[in-house]
Image (tube, rainbow, N blue to C red):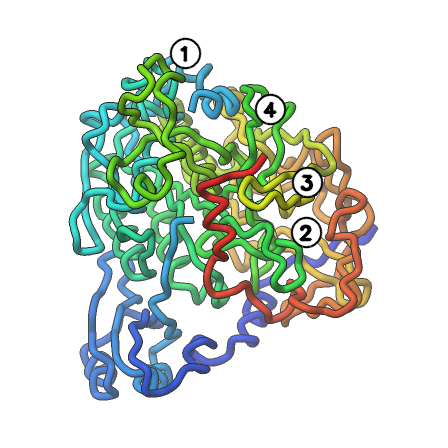
Amino acid sequence: MNKPLRLTLSIVLASACAFAGSLSPDLKASNPSTSVRVLVRFSNPPSAALLNQIGGNGAAFDKQFKHLPKTMVFHGSVGAMKKVADLPGVLYVAPDRPIKRKLDITAATVGATLAQQYGFTGAGVGVAVVDSGVDMTNPDLAGRVVYSEDFVGTGTRDFYGHGTHVAGIIGASGAASGGKYKGIAPGVNIISLRVLGADGSGSDSTVIAAIDRAIELQSTYNIRVLNLSLGRPVGEPFYADQLCQAVEAAWKAGITVVVAAGNDGRDNTNGNQGYGTISSPANDPWVITVGAMKAEGTPVRGDDMIASYSSKGPSMIDHFVKPDLVAPGNRIASLRAPGSTLDVEYPENVVDPTTFGGQAGTYSPYFYMNGTSMAAPVVSGAAALLLQQYPTLTPDQLKARLMKTASKTFPASSIATDLTTGQTFTSYYDIFTVGAGYLDIGAALNNTELAPGTTPSPVAVLNTATGTITIVNPDSIAWGDSIAWGDSIAWGDSIAWGDSIAWGDSIAWGDSIAWGDSAVYGASVVKGTSIWTTTGSPLTQKNTNGAGALFGTKTPSAQSSPQAERTEMKGEK
């Protein structure tokens, strides 16, 4: 086979041609008189003269960020923002988009229980939880929520109930359950940064402000991990997305960023059977993007299956291979925020106290939830365990180790049933569904390899002449001095890029993926050899009408579907 061409900087820049101009497509299409709040990205920190020009064009200043000096928030009419976008020094203007939130068996399944027996609890490691807040009164977190700040404006309490659950998956001590519902890293310190309101919604600017604060507090609380169990649809390339720029700033500061992939893996709105539904900032190539598995009620991995709602790659517009790995996310028992929105609306999700030695009908501090929002903190907890053992690990080295040591044994396909509707969904275990594999903490702790370079997720490239896809290692010109992915790779035992990908014992990536004759690719086309998935996967089937082709310009719906949100509470079997 011929090796694929490397993705060079010129090709990355060519991709930007599809997004020429500095105004986001959704703003271009908006009524000029509509009031809007926007994030403005500058080529350099703006001068006083440029800020005066912006004000003179009708845009009022709202906010700036200490560690993202090239990004600011303004408000005004869409017409004013169109003028601002034309000013020299303004790179990109986009709306301040809405954000949504996206353990006994869990800990044992991924190997955390054994790690804890050997003394690895994440002690001394700070994990920033950017979410709906954390209930500090829960005994499972006693004394370990070391910092709490509200970016919504109504207090630090968890009025929604999502952030407390996420924090519990990361670091609950199990004090209220006799150790049964213990988190992955029960010794970590939690830094609670509240960005979601009582209805579970927030905005880009509040999340960016929280990330900015995490960077500022990094040395004070030894913040080494940042968990984002939230997201919104992708609206532009990652390098123009302000959320992606914020998570990259944290990554470059030495904080490992873990992000939920999203819960839209069943979304067939664009005819893609759930492919291309990774949310932002999970689409950023640097962060660790996590999909959700189902533990099937046992602590062994052999019977586990992918959750059909787990969002699939490649990422829209940039086509990065996502998720990076998967972890348990279905029917996860973790901490409850009493009186919160979710607690009131879903009383049936409260864990029966008799499961951990309590009396029937008495108060239970635990709650069930589902989704990649629950899978991400499993990986965040795992990262804390590794950082306790190996404090000098960089985010790139940690990402590489978790991906390389992930279990790669999967079935070819599985069928799931939605507990709300009774619908069935078939999932295939290709690279865009399970990434580099299933989190294995024991294997990661026993591994001592250090990735020699950076670890951006690779790119899926369509050959328009053949309709096949190649997985391509990003070129060092675009990404830095060196890339960690080489002949010995996280996706299998050995890869020479472009020749073949050995995917464990159960799946061989060989000759070709037939993406469909009508798939329309964007500007960044690289010809090369290709890989294939298991027979029967939607990736091997023809798309005869071209609707929603992933390598085109269509994007997922602007909001998560109601079905995706119901699934987060009800789960599947």
Q: Can residue 54 be seen in this view?
A: yes
Q: What residue type is labelled 1?
A: Gln
Residue name at image x 50 percent, y 42 percent:
290
The residue identified by callout 4 is 301
From the viewer's perspective, is residue 357 above or below residue 530? above
Tag nearer the camera, 3 or 2:
3
Q: Residues within 10 Å of mark 2 (few under 14, many from 20)?
A: many
Residue name at image x 57 percent, y 49 percent:
322
Q: Give x and y (percent) for residue 177.
A: 32, 17
The residue identified by callout 3 is 429
Front-most of 329 and 410? 329
Q: Distance between the residues labelled 2 and 1?
A: 39 Å
Report the disc number at residue 471: 2
Q: Residues within 10 Å of mark 1 (few under 14, many from 20)?
A: few
The disc, 2 or 1, on the residue closer to the chain's N-terminal end is 1
Q: Give x and y (percent) for residue 222.
A: 26, 35
Q: Label 2: state its secondary structure.
A: strand
Q: Which amino acid does label 2 sit on?
A: Ile
